[in-house]
Image (cartoon, rainbow, N blue to C red):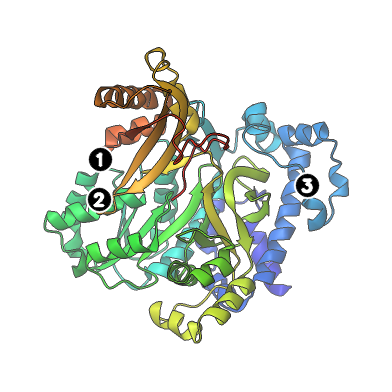
Amino acid sequence: MKDEQQILPSFDFLSQQNRIRDFFSFDIKEFERLLRQKDESFWSRMGEQRALKLFHMAAKRVPAYKHFLRMHRVNPDRIKTIRDFAHVPITDKKNYIQQYPLADRSWDGTLRNQKIAAISSGTTGEPTFWLRGDFQEFEQGIVHELLYRYLFDIEKYRTLLVIGFPMGIYVSGVATAFPSFLVATKGYPLTIASVGNSKNQILRTVKHLQKDYEQIILAGHPFFIKDVIEAGRTAGIMWSRKKMRVMFCSEEFSEHWRSYVAECTGIKQDLKSLINVYGSSDLLLIGYETPISIFCRMLAEDNPLFRRRLFDEEAATAPQLFQYNPLLRHIEAENGELLFTSASGIPLIRFNIHDAGKVMPYRDIADALDEALAGWKQKLHNQSNGAPVWRLPFVVLRGRNDQTVIFYAVNIYPDHIRIALDHDPFFGKITGKFTLRKCNTKRMDAYLEVHIELRGGIKQNAGLVERIRNHLVRRLKEVNIEYADASARLDKDLRPRVRLWPYQHPKYFRPGTKPRYIAKE
């Protein structure tokens, strides 16, 4: 209990203290000690306490949530335990975010304490704005400091962090740059180059500054950073001359892809070289790969029996696997989707972003490893250079529930494709049925396929393919601000590849089956 009493006050989301000052006085080494010594029950217990507190405070002080509960006939006074909490109605964009004004969804119905705005794209093309205050920056500063120390040893090496996320109003750039700056000003030998997603600018920055640093960290979306690394090698940058680390976010990739990118850098891959993290515009950083999560995923891709034991599925590749701290993000799974409770700038209670997945206790992971691999703890120790194991729970992420393809960190919604295909010149040629599929080339570059069903009696022809493709690109740029921004910024051909299929072809358009808007690998 003493340790809980020390930790919980620091994460009081309604404290009126100076949160930036709190960040600099926070004892990160003590927090690391607890992560090494405490099991997941310690963190889960604190997370449940915070989730219940957040619920009750939001029910009193967030006008929109108070009204939401009243409309659902929920008496907050009857929600006393975490079991009771599991019956609180689920919120999402449609039933909560889009139903109430921004101020009403903030503490005390005011935007006074909201300091930073970010946006996310939506299915209709209308963006959603997400606001946050200084508590969120304090919290993200702690998480980034932990990860930079644990994975990248920033206290040991003169480090250049090159941020390749977009630096506009989208969340990833600012939400990485600001907490990283806070970490750097805490006395670490860390320099930040907040470049944005310009490949040429990143390469120019690395060329000019690499000689002054012992370690380089590239942060950005996976397929963009891969392009940077390949282009840098062509331009004469010897990535292996420095200690090299990479931090990805927003997209899934296979372990084969991870190994390929590590090989491109010329560095010896360990379980701390290339790390993916799990975040969103509304919740910021949720989870993160750690040596044990990568170790499990590598084993799962090579061992079908272990993969089925761990994930209960027949997929050819393992889904994404992250650890998370319940103290910071209370996560549940219901009907195959993840629910989040978080003291975000807009408080979110049992919020469904429609990510498919499940929560797995650390003990279940350890038991599966015990069955599958003798001596796994020593192997993990050797491959992670002795990094301690955090006995935190895991979140399995299978992507969006048939709603979105994430392509170069752009959310491509089926509705956007449907809008483009609802075009008079196409009505006599196609049925309107389509399926999206994200693919990789032999060089591990991503591209997007749109498979479209022709009407009966209509034959394929190159001219129709080109017309559909051109119109599709034009409409995507009009309705999807993320796609328009990425198309303008990235030195990549992001145009979808259109494939036309005969009417009722069994591959994607078998008669009598439910339409699949997204084809899984």
**Mark closer to the chain start, 3 or 2:** 3
Relative placement, left or right, of 392 versus 118 is right
- The image quarter containing residue 5 is bottom right
Residue furthest top as drawn: 424
Q: Nearer the viewer, residue 297 or 7?
A: 297
Q: Is residue 391 visible?
A: yes
10 Å crowding of disc 2: few (<14), some (14-19), many (20+): some
Q: Nearer the viewer, residue 98 or 262?
A: 262
Mark 1 residue element: loop
User: Residue 17, percent across and down?
Assistant: 62, 51
What is the three-letter code of the residue carrying label 3? His
Mark 3 residue element: helix
What is the three-letter code of the residue carrying label 2? Asp
What is the three-letter code of the residue carrying label 1? Lys
Q: Gap in Å between the C-alphas at discs 3 and 2?
A: 47 Å
Count of numbered circles in the view: 3
Residue furthest front as drawn: 457
Seen in the picture, residue 471 relative to 239 is either above or below; the reply is: above
Residue that badge 3 annotates: 56
Q: Gap in Å between the C-alphas at discs 2 and 1?
A: 9 Å
**Mark closer to the chain start, 3 or 1:** 3
10 Å crowding of disc 1: few (<14), some (14-19), many (20+): some
User: Residue 56, percent across and down?
Assistant: 78, 47
Q: Nearer the viewer, residue 472 or 75?
A: 472
The answer to whether marks 2 and 1 mark residues whose Cβ atoms lie closer than 8 Å is yes
Residue that badge 1 annotates: 492
Residue drawn where x is 72% and y is 49% of the image: 54
**Mark closer to the chain start, 2 or 1:** 2
Residue furthest left as drawn: 236
Residue that badge 2 annotates: 227
Please identify, in this view, whether the residue under mark 3 or under mark 2 is nearer the observer.
2
